[in-house]
């Protein structure tokens, strides 16, 4: 796989901006914040997610400042790259950015919010999603 051009700004979009997209935003900031401006949004409004915050804290990232927002609520929607994390988010994002010169990539990403079981079982699913996103981010933005 060739390494695509390194963007200066990236937007991660999911159905709701509460788990996967903020995870990706915070991981990108942590790993490449000196090179890439990262932000996240959802197609629909979401709520804060304490499991997301917990697994990010395990990684040494404080995600408690995250406030879910939709694409329409973004202060700055001029970005180099948009990465969608669900098929539904991809379709909505393509419509939202229609006519704008922006690259859009689709990364199918597991939805940890459907995890069942005790707290540890749910956290394990969230960790797997965090690891999947971190691997993709490292591969996509490494030089």
Image (spheres, rainbow, N blue to C red):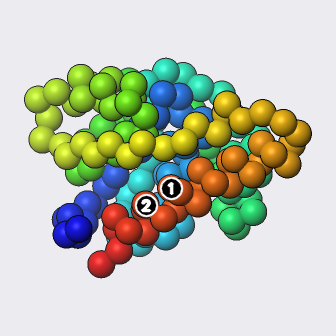
Q: Looking at the picture, how far across and down is residue 112, in whole percent?
A: 64, 39
Residue 42 x, y percent position in the rendering: 47, 30
Does the CB distance between marks 1 and 2 fall below 8 Å?
yes
In the depicted view, which residue is nearer to us: 116 or 68?
116
Looking at the image, is 41 positioned above or below residue 124? above
Relative to 16, say whether 62 is above or below.
Answer: below
Crowd around label 2: few <14 · some 14–19 · many ≥20 (10 Å): few
Q: Quick check: 112 above or below 5?
A: above
Left or right, 41 with reference to 46: left
Decide which of 124, 59 is in the foreground and name it. Answer: 124
Q: Is residue 60 left or right of residue 10?
A: right
Q: Which residue is drawn at the image coordinates 81% and 45% (left, top)?
A: 121
The residue to which callout 2 is attached is 136
User: Is 116 displayed left or right of 114 in the figure?
Assistant: right
Classify 10 Å Cα crowding around label 1: few (below 14), some (14-19), many (20 and above).
many
SS state under label 1 = helix
Compared to 7, does 72 lie above or below?
above
Q: Whole-percent x and y of residue 64?
A: 70, 47
User: Which element is circle 2 on?
Assistant: helix
Between 14 and 10, the one nearer to me in the picture: 14
Q: Is residue 92 visible?
A: yes
Residue 100, position as x, y percentages in the image: 14, 35
| Most distant residue in the right direction | 118
**Circle 1 residue:** 133
| Image quadrant occupied by the C terminus | bottom left
Could you tell me if residue 33 is visible in this image? Answer: no
Q: Nearer the viewer, residue 55 or 62?
A: 55
The image quarter in which residue 116 lies: top right
Question: Which residue lies at the image location 64% right of the left edge and 54% below the top edge?
Answer: 128
């Amino acid at each position: 796989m060739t390494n695509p051009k390194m963007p200066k700004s990236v937007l991660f979009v999911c159905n709701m901006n509460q788990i996967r997209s903020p995870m990706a935003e915070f991981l990108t900031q942590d790993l490449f914040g000196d090179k890439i401006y990262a932000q996240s949004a959802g197609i629909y409004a979401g709520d804060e997610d304490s499991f997301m915050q917990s697994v990010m804290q395990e990684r040494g990232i404080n995600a408690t400042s995250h406030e879910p927002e939709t694409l329409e609520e973004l202060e700055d929607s001029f970005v180099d790259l948009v990465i969608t994390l669900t098929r539904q988010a991809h379709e909505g994002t393509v419509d939202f950015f229609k006519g704008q010169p922006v690259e859009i990539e689709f990364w199918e990403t597991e939805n940890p919010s459907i995890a069942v079981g005790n707290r540890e079982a749910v956290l394990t699913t969230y960790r797997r999603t965090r690891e999947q996103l971190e691997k993709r981010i490292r591969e996509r933005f490494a030089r």
